[in-house]
Image (cartoon, helix red, strand yellow):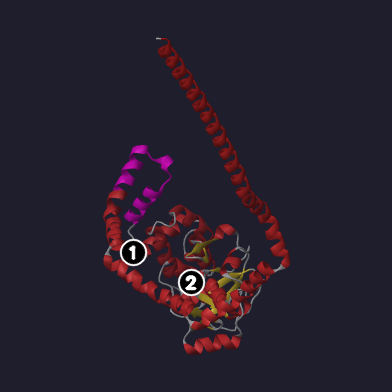
C-alpha cells in the first residue's frame, strides 16, 4: 500500500504536538533534512530550536521552548507514543514549577527527569536520571510534568532557598490545588534544613506562609476550610460551600460573559485564522493537488484494470445472469397471459352468442304459435 503524501503526514504529526514537529519525525514521513531546511528558509515552517520546527501559520503556544525541548528528548517518537511509555521524560524542578504557574522562580534552564543517563549539548537543558512512579507526574496541557507535591519535594531536596520555596507553597495553597496537610507531609523530611524542628512539616508550612505574606489567621482559616469533612458538622460544611459559591459566582458570571462575548469570539477567530489559512493554502495549492493526484492515480488504474478484466466480467455476468433470464422470461409470460385472456374472452363471447341464438329461436317459436292461433280463428 502506498503511503500518504509527506505533507499530510507532517500536518497530522504536528496537529497533536502543539503545531510542532522534529526533523526526525519529518524524515519518517518522507522529508529529507535538506528539504526541511529549505522549507524553513522560505518561511513555510518556523524553526523553534535545534531540530524542532513549527508549521507555518500555527500560533506559538505557552512554554513553547519547553515543549520543543521535551520533543527533542526522543525526536523520532511522537508525543502520543512517548506518553504511552512507562518513562516518557518528565518536566521537573524549576521548569515544573513554572509549568504549574507556581512561585516566581527563574527557569532559564529547562529540567527533565529521564529514565537513563542522557547528555545534552545545549546549555539550556538539564537531564536528571530518575524512574518516576506514575502518581508523581501529571499532564499539563498535554505535557508530562511532576505533580505539585512532587515538585515541592524535588525542589526542597535540591535545597532551593526558602523564599522561593515559600512562594511556591503559597501559590499551591491559595489556588486550591494542594492541601496544607499534604504539603506538610512532603516537607516533614526537609524541615530541619530550613530551620524548623526535625520532622515539623506543619511548622515549616506555617512559617513559609507568613514569609510569603499570608497572615497566620488566614492560614488557620484555610486549614479549617480544607479540613476533613468528618471533623465538621454537615451544616458547617454546607454553609462553607454555599459561602464559597456566593463568592465565586460573580467571577464565574464574568468569565461566562467574557467567553461568550463577540469580542472574545472575534479574538479567538483571529488566533485560529492563521492556522486555518495555512491549512487551506496547503490543501488548495497546485503542489498538493498534483501530489494527491499522483497518490490516487494508481488506485484509479487498479480499479480500471479490475473492472475491465475477463475475470471481473465473467463474475459480473454470473451475478447478473439470473436477473437477465428473469427479464427475458417476462415477454413470454406476458404473451401467455394475453393468449389466455383472449381465449377466455372468446369463450365468453361464444357463450353469449349461444344464448342469443337460443333466445332468438324461442322468439321465432312464439311467433309461429301466434300465427297458427290466428289462422284457426
Q: Is disc 1 placed on a helix, strand or loop?
A: loop
Residue 251 is at least partly visible in this image: yes
Above/below status of 338 relative to 294: above
In the image, is residue 33 part of the stretch drawn in magenta?
Answer: no
Q: Of marks 2 and 1, which one's residue comes earlier in the chain? A: 2
For mark 2, give the secondary structure.
loop
Could you tell me how far apart the alpha carbons at marks 2 and 1 are, in whole angstroms? 37 Å
**Image marks 2 and 1: residues in contact by CB distance under 8 Å:** no
The crowding category of the residue bearing disc 1, from other C-alpha atoms within 10 Å (few below 14, some 14 to 19, many at least 20), is few
Residue closer to the observer: 136 or 252: 252
Q: Quadrant of the N terminus?
A: bottom right
Placement of 129 over or under 203, stated as above or below: below
**Alpha-carbon neighbours of circle 2 within 10 Å: few (<14), some, or many (≥20)?**
many
Image quadrant of residue 292?
Answer: bottom right
Q: Quick check: 352 left or right of 117?
A: left
Q: Nearer the viewer, residue 377 or 48?
A: 377
Q: Is residue 240 magenta?
A: yes
Q: Is residue 108 visible?
A: no
Which residue, given by chain and number where applicable, does mark 1 sit on?
A: 213
Give the labeled residue for mark 2.
18
**Where does the magenta region start and end?**
216-243
Residue nearest the viewer, comparing 316 with 323 = 323
x%, y% of residue 239? 31, 42
Residue at 31% x, 49% y is: 245
Left or right: 35 in relation to 48: right
On screen, residue 80 above or below 47? above
Amino acid at each position: 500500500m502506498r503511503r500518504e503524501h509527506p505533507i499530510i503526514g507532517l500536518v497530522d504529526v504536528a496537529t497533536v504536538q502543539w503545531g510542532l514537529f522534529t526533523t526526525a519525525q519529518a524524515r519518517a514521513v518522507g522529508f529529507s533534512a535538506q528539504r526541511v531546511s529549505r522549507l524553513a528558509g522560505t518561511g513555510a515552517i518556523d524553526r523553534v530550536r535545534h531540530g524542532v520546527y513549527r508549521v507555518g501559520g500555527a500560533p506559538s503556544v505557552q512554554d513553547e521552548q519547553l515543549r520543543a525541548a521535551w520533543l527533542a528528548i526522543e525526536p523520532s517518537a511522537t508525543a502520543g507514543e512517548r506518553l504511552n511509555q512507562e518513562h516518557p521524560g518528565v518536566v521537573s524542578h524549576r521548569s515544573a514549577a513554572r509549568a504549574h504557574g507556581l512561585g516566581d522562580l527563574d527557569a532559564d534552564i529547562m529540567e527533565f527527569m529521564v529514565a537513563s543517563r542522557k547528555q545534552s549539548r545545549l546549555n539550556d537543558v538539564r537531564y536528571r536520571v530518575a524512574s518516576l512512579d506514575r502518581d508523581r507526574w501529571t499532564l499539563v496541557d498535554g505535557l508530562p510534568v511532576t505533580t505539585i507535591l512532587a515538585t515541592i519535594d524535588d525542589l526542597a531536596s535540591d535545597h532551593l532557598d526558602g523564599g522561593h520555596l515559600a512562594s511556591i507553597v503559597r501559590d499551591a495553597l491559595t489556588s486550591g490545588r494542594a492541601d496544607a496537610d499534604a504539603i506538610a507531609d512532603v516537607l516533614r523530611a526537609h524541615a530541619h534544613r530550613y530551620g524548623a524542628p526535625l520532622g515539623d512539616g506543619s511548622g515549616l508550612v506555617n512559617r513559609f506562609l507568613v514569609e510569603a505574606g499570608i497572615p497566620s489567621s488566614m492560614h488557620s482559616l484555610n486549614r479549617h476550610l480544607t479540613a476533613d469533612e468528618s471533623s465538621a458538622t454537615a451544616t458547617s460544611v454546607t454553609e462553607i460551600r454555599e459561602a464559597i459559591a456566593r463568592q465565586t459566582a460573580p467571577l464565574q458570571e464574568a468569565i461566562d460573559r467574557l467567553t461568550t462575548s463577540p469580542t472574545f469570539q472575534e479574538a479567538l477567530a483571529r488566533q485560529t485564522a492563521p492556522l486555518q489559512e495555512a491549512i487551506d493554502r496547503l490543501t488548495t495549492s497546485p503542489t498538493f493537488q498534483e501530489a494527491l493526484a499522483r497518490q490516487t492515480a494508481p488506485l484509479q488504474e487498479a480499479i480500471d484494470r479490475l473492472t475491465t478484466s475477463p475475470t471481473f466480467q465473467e463474475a459480473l455476468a454470473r451475478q447478473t445472469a439470473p436477473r437477465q433470464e428473469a427479464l427475458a422470461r417476462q415477454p413470454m409470460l406476458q404473451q401467455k397471459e394475453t393468449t389466455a385472456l383472449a381465449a377466455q374472452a372468446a369463450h365468453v363471447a361464444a357463450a353469449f352468442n349461444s344464448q342469443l341464438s337460443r333466445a332468438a329461436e324461442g322468439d321465432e317459436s312464439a311467433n309461429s304459435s301466434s300465427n297458427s292461433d290466428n289462422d284457426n280463428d
